[in-house]
Image: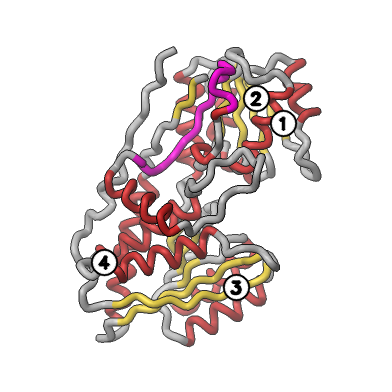
Amino acid sequence: MKIIFPILSNPVFRRTVKLLLCLLWIGYSQGTTHVLRFGGIFEYVESGPMGAEELAFRFAVNTINRNRTLLPNTTLTYDTQKINLYDSFEASKKACDQLSLGVAAIFGPSHSSSANAVQSICNALGVPHIQTRWKHQVSDNKDSFYVSLYPDFSSLSRAILDLVQFFKWKTVTVVYDDSTGLIRLQELIKAPSRYNLRLKIRQLPADTKDAKPLLKEMKRGKEFHVIFDCSHEMAAGILKQALAMGMMTEYYHYIFTTLDLFALDVEPYRYSGVNMTGFRILNTENTQVSSIIEKWSMERLQAPPKPDSGLLDGFMTMEFHSCCPGWSAMARSHLTATSASWVQAILLPQPPE
């Protein structure tokens, strides 16, 4: 089995971090106080554990405060509020409550309807809004006071197209979860008109996790080169079903667009011969990144995955990756303007047979 994890070189991501470096200065410009407060709005499920985004938010602020060499005369504080899923009215109310406290910026929420409501308020009052969700950029976008920590979809789409060309694929099947996947993969979808490429597009079933009927059709059609646009949790289920269908052999090559594929437990497929390719943004071999990962694991802030989920215990997903480096960058902004220089572009070579 071959598994490849290229690390994306994303200029928009680097620009995002540079914008984050300005947020601390924004806080200072509001007065001479050495206490900076940030707001966090997070969705929750009743009786469910604390979400990964809120855990990362708290962890990042506490980590900065514990390291007094970063901000020796400044303490970061936060106000966190929980809202119901998709409740934009409650999100607006919580944002107003936090703004009345004088927060320097608001982090979250994640879902589009709630995030858009908070973004509208932040635009009106000139307060930075930090987002971790994927957001489709339109030409007449009037949102000006926001920073998106999610990678630019066009960069990912071009990277996938480059991979398809590198592998010299002539036929490709795209399997997507929802319609936003077609937007994220538009560079690939437009490819047949420019390249000698045959493209077949399929959608995962909406009301069930059973993908076997779809996989059966793909197997019957001898569709060996497949790109899956779905979450890493859904990818784990698809791989287990593909194994049961006999579709985890050396004839198959799967590309996953999720940036959290490394969180999957691929041990069951090690000797199957299947080829899998995924992406990640951060270089986990970097000492600064590995140090943060180790501290996160030591504090056991993330609950272990459910049994038989196909996920690894203790791995951080994009919620953490997009939050913690950003807050750390804000803390270091008074020291250097190049604190994000560790974000490197490394293409990992395909391992030998």
Q: Nearer the viewer, mark 1 or mark 3?
A: 3
For the residue pair 261 and 147, the one nearer the viewer reads as 261
Disc 3 crowd rating (10 Å Cα; few below 14, some 14-19, many 20+) is: some
- Identify the mark nearer the N-term, 1 or 4: 4
CA distance for labels 1 and 2 = 7 Å
User: Which residue type does callout 4 highlight?
Assistant: Asn
Residue shown at 49% from the left, 41% from the top? 154
In the displayed structure, 80 sits above or below 173; it is below
Residue shown at 22% from the left, 54% from the top? 338
- Highlighted magenta segment, given as a residue range: 268-284
State the residue position of label 3.
Answer: 82
Disc 4 crowd rating (10 Å Cα; few below 14, some 14-19, many 20+) is: few
In the displayed structure, 30 sits above or below 151; it is below
Q: Does residue 197 appear in the picture of this structure?
A: no
Is 5 magenta? The answer is: no
Q: Nearer the viewer, mark 1 or mark 4?
A: 4
- Identify the mark nearer the N-term, 1 or 3: 3
State the residue position of label 1.
Answer: 202
Q: What's the mark number on residue 173?
A: 2
State the residue position of label 4.
Answer: 67
In the rendered structure, are the residues bearing label 1 and label 2 in contact, judged by CB atoms less than 8 Å apart?
Answer: yes
In the rendered structure, are the residues bearing label 3 and label 4 in contact, judged by CB atoms less than 8 Å apart?
Answer: no
For the residue pair 185 and 204, the one nearer the viewer reads as 204
- Tell me if 254 is positioned left or right of 155 in this view: right
